[in-house]
Image (tube, coloured by chain):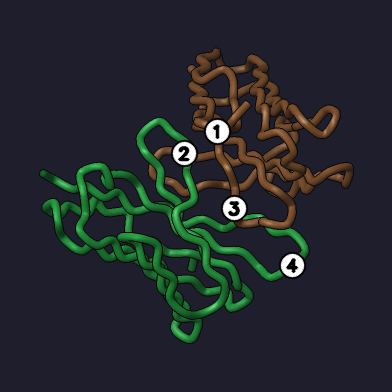
Chain colours: A brown, B green
Amino acid sequence: GAGVSQSPSNKVTEKGKDVELRCDPISGHTALYWYRQSLGQGLEFLIYFQGNSAPDKSGLPSDRFSAERTGGSVSTLTIQRTQQEDSAVYLCASSLVTQGGTLFFGSGTQLSVL
Amino acid sequence: QKEVEQDPGPLSVPEGAIVSLNCTYSNSAFQYFMWYRQYSRKGPELLMYTYSSGNKEDGRFTAQVDKSSKYISLFIRDSQPSDSATYLCAMSHLSGYSTLTFGKGTMLLVSP
């Protein structure tokens, strides 16, 4: 597609349930990022994928969070045993590796944990 | 002290005003500086991208970087209601790849 696509756009879940968030990056972009944006907060880096290299998971807040990227394209962010503090907008971005600052963001998934 | 500080606003101005948005940072390793614009319920989009110190102009937008003061600015001339959005500064280290450190964003409201 023309831009970064994220699904679902909204997700409401109960505390303790697992959720999966999907990101489809721009075709040809080798770098993929997940960020989290909470109300009144800036973007918090979660995880970074670059080609076939091991992902940079340094931003994942706990072991309940995991992500994978299949075939160098689509990525899934999984949150297990969701907590209320996980409520936020989860943003995915992609970029060409040579333009590290030029991130193209999707519209995000608004996650609400009740 | 946070790595990147940005006044959250909101900043309210009348149409046609010159707007100044600013960020300060503490990490002298930052070399790349960006401004992103984020409309409500949308992802951020890149507005300006600069490397090291200096000015860069693009239409009504001017980005300014002063590394000696660890201070960056975005100026918007002849502001329009369509400029109403949250503006996030972002910066990164000089490395093979880098993740961005974002400010919290400043909400700008331009009234007709």
In the rendered image, residues at marks 2 and 4 fall on the same chain: no
Front position among marks 1 and 2: 1
Q: Residues within 10 Å of mark 3 (few under 14, many from 20)?
A: many
> Label 1 vs label 3: CA separation?
13 Å
C-alpha gap between disc 2 and disc 3: 22 Å
Check chain identity for marks 3 and 4: say if they share one.
no
Q: Secondary structure at mark 4?
A: loop
Chain label for disc 2: A
Q: Position of residue A45 (x, y in %)?
A: 62, 47
Q: In the image, is B110 to the left or to the right of B89?
A: left
Q: Which residue is at 82% across, 34% downward?
A: A72
Q: Quadrant of residue B8?
A: bottom left
Gap between marks 1 and 2 measured at Cα: 16 Å
Task: Determine the image quadrant of residue A26.
Answer: top right
Chain holding disc 3: A
Check if mark 1 and mark 2 are on a common chain: yes
